[in-house]
Amino acid sequence: MNTDQFPNFEGPVCPLPFDHAEQIVISHGSGGRQTHDLIRKVFHNHFSNPALDAGNDSAILHLSAQMPGKIAVSTDAHIVSPYFFPGGDIGKLAVCGTVNDVSMSGAVPRYLTASFILEEGFPIRDLEKIVLSMEATAKEAEVEIVAGDTKVVQKGKGDGIFISTTGIGWLPLDRRIGGEQARAGDIVILSGTIGEHGLAVLAARGELGFTADLRSDVAPLNHMIQTVLEAAPDIHVLRDPTRGGVATTLNEIASQSGVNIFLEEDQIPIIPQVHAVCEMLGFDPLYIANEGKVIVICPPSSVKRVLEALHAQKYGQNARVIGEVRAAPAGKVLLRTLIAGTRILDTLSGEMLPRIC
């Protein structure tokens, strides 16, 4: 899939060291000269840092020597189709997804590893655009890509490109944030509007049947989250509502903590374009994946400070309170609808939109 088909792609551009027409071939994964050329000219050219430059089989990392703490680790795989979409691409998604997952524990992401599975025939021009996007996103998040691997599969045995990432971060010893920490009386805050990512990817496939002005919300949230934690260190839960959307994510939290989460439908922020597409196609925006949002659950005394911190950040300007945590019925998520009824929001049983993160 060539990026010329996606004029909205806004990834960084630089002179490419390879011929633009060159493609991935099986020997790029053999471990020989072509493998080393690919690594040097594409990956190392953009990910260079002292740990990676050492050229060893493992990277020696230094976390916070000045402060005691723990190591937070998260791993993820990314198979989005198409791999370029309005607002992002598989490379940006890979960095943001892992940076955000590490951040949800309250940790500060520091390092990433990245593994690439490439299909024979994949355009090196597109690979470099993806790598450039990863480089730019890692710089925004202030993390380093310190190790990686590349494998090539025969044509027809893959789907262009798969990326697997691992994130490593530093977590203060006294910080306890997790899905099991929600308490009755807590308030549920959402950092912004929902549904853009899943629908933007669907639109990029040309499967809507009509045009829609939709862009993915994919973004690194680590700086925003650290700002919020500085303002309100007593936050109980942080979670990004990716696959399965807000409804499935809150069901996971309700189950982990043994609580009920009660939402107000009229408080859930949704842009008009998402609302219109969902109305036309019968989708529920509460189950659509997001890649640049965070759910914050905190005591009532912290709500004002959390909202002020979110509103001051680029990715949190549309944050608002969407509900509260109750004692019962435990393990359930309920929604007060626009017509004042109550609806059970269950866990998504399948994929509403396949392969979007």
Image (tube, helix red, strand yellow):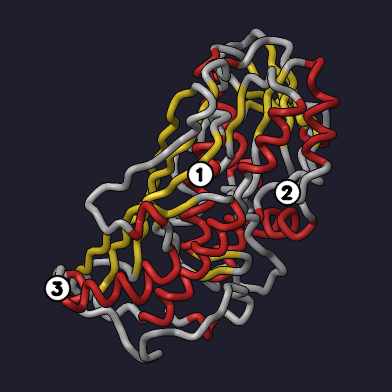
**Disc 2: which residue:** 315
Q: Secondary structure at mark 1?
A: loop
x then y, percent, for residue 117: 28, 63
**Disc 3: which residue:** 32
x then y, percent, for residue 286: 64, 41
Who is closer to the viewer here, 230 or 52? 52
Q: Amino acid at mark 2?
A: Tyr
Q: Residues within 10 Å of mark 2 (few under 14, many from 20)?
A: many
Looking at the image, residue 218 lies above or below residue 286: below
Q: Nearer the viewer, mark 2 or mark 1?
A: 2
In this image, 336 relative to 242: left or right? right
Residue visible at 54% across and 32% down in the picture: 107
Q: Nearer the viewer, mark 3 or mark 2?
A: 3
Looking at the image, residue 239 lies above or below residue 232: below
x then y, percent, for residue 174: 56, 15
Q: Secondary structure at mark 3?
A: loop
Residue 346, visible in the rendered structure? no
Looking at the image, residue 159 lies above or below residue 282: below
Q: Amino acid at mark 3?
A: Gly
Q: Nearer the viewer, mark 3 or mark 1?
A: 3
In this image, 345 relative to 279: left or right? left
In this image, 280 relative to 240: left or right? right
**Which mark sits nearer the N-terminus, 3 or 2?**
3
For marks 3 and 2, give the CA distance. Answer: 43 Å
**Disc 1: which residue:** 243
Q: Residues within 10 Å of mark 1 (few under 14, many from 20)?
A: many
**Which mark sits nearer the N-terminus, 3 or 1?**
3
